[in-house]
Image: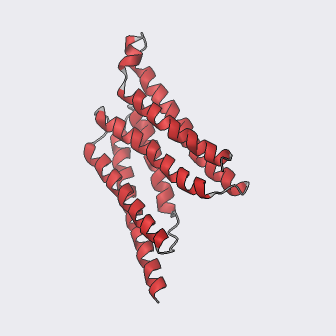
């Protein structure tokens, strides 16, 4: 069902590769007479707009009772596409540490696998507060990195630490859910 929340998630899926292209092609702006900072501004603007759709699609789905199976699939997919497009683009341009991005990607893939196993076992492992904080800190770090602002590297490593912690929290929750199921 294509309702407003699913449309917003779909918009995020469309904006992710566009933002990725902008990050990787600053010469498009400079060759057309614009300062390189316009590349930063435009990539960051797209990222902020796309990130805002993440908040609004979830809020609208809950408040207007428009949660759907399609939305449950699209929302996390769109989130991953957006953050990975930003992180990979930043890494490829040298603006972000390859190790930091590697750790974040491995955690995301691993937890996606754990969630898949949980679903097949009929176990619900919901997003924790640490997972929500992880998302917010990652988004702030991406914004700082896109704009080449001071402390962007420190924010990225803070995001890595929270990402690892929230991943361990998911694993702990999954292990406890498995133990409860076996009793």
Coloring applied to the structure = secondary structure
Q: Does residue 110 appear to the left or right of 143 in the view shown?
A: left
Q: Residue furthest right?
A: 64
Q: Residue furthest left?
A: 99
The answer to whether residue 141 is seen in the rendering is yes
Give the percent coordinates (x, y) of residue 40: 43, 27
Q: Nearer the viewer, residue 165 or 114?
A: 114
At 48% across and 50% down in the image, what residue appears?
77
Q: Nearer the viewer, residue 93 or 35?
A: 93
Q: Is residue 101 above or below residue 177?
A: above
Answer with the quarter of the image where residue 26 lies. top left
Q: Residue furthest front?
A: 1
At 64% across and 48% down in the image, what residue appears?
5
Give the percent coordinates (x, y) of residue 176: 44, 79
Q: Does residue 154 appear to the left or right of 80 in the view shown?
A: left
Q: Residue furthest bottom?
A: 183
Give the percent coordinates (x, y) of residue 79: 49, 48
Q: Does residue 150 appear to the left or right of 54 in the view shown?
A: left
Q: Nearer the viewer, residue 175 or 182?
A: 182
Q: Is residue 179 above or below residue 122?
A: below
Give the percent coordinates (x, y) of residue 124: 52, 71
The answer to whether residue 136 is seen in the rendering is no
At 47% across and 75% down in the image, what residue appears?
121
Q: How many marks?
A: 0
Answer with the quarter of the image where residue 142 lies. top left
At 39% across and 51% down in the image, what residue appears?
159
């Amino acid at each position: 069902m294509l309702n407003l929340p699913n449309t917003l998630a779909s918009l995020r899926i469309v904006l992710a590769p566009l933002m990725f292209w902008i990050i990787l092609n600053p010469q498009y702006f400079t060759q057309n007479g614009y300062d390189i900072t316009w590349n930063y501004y435009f990539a960051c603007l797209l990222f902020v707009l796309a990130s805002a759709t993440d908040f609004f699609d979830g809020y609208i789905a809950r408040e207007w009772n428009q949660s759907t199976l399609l939305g449950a699939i699209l929302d996390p997919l769109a989130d991953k596409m957006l953050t990975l497009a930003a992180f990979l683009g930043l890494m490829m341009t040298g603006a972000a540490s390859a190790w930091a991005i590697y750790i974040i990607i491995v955690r995301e893939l691993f937890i996606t696998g754990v969630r898949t196993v949980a679903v097949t076992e009929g176990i619900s492992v919901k997003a924790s507060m640490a997972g929500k904080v992880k998302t917010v800190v990652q988004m702030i770090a991406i914004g700082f990195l896109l704009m080449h602002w001071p402390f962007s590297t420190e924010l990225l490593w803070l995001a890595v630490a929270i990402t690892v912690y929230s991943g361990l929290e998911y694993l702990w929750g999954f292990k406890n859910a498995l133990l409860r199921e076996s009793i």
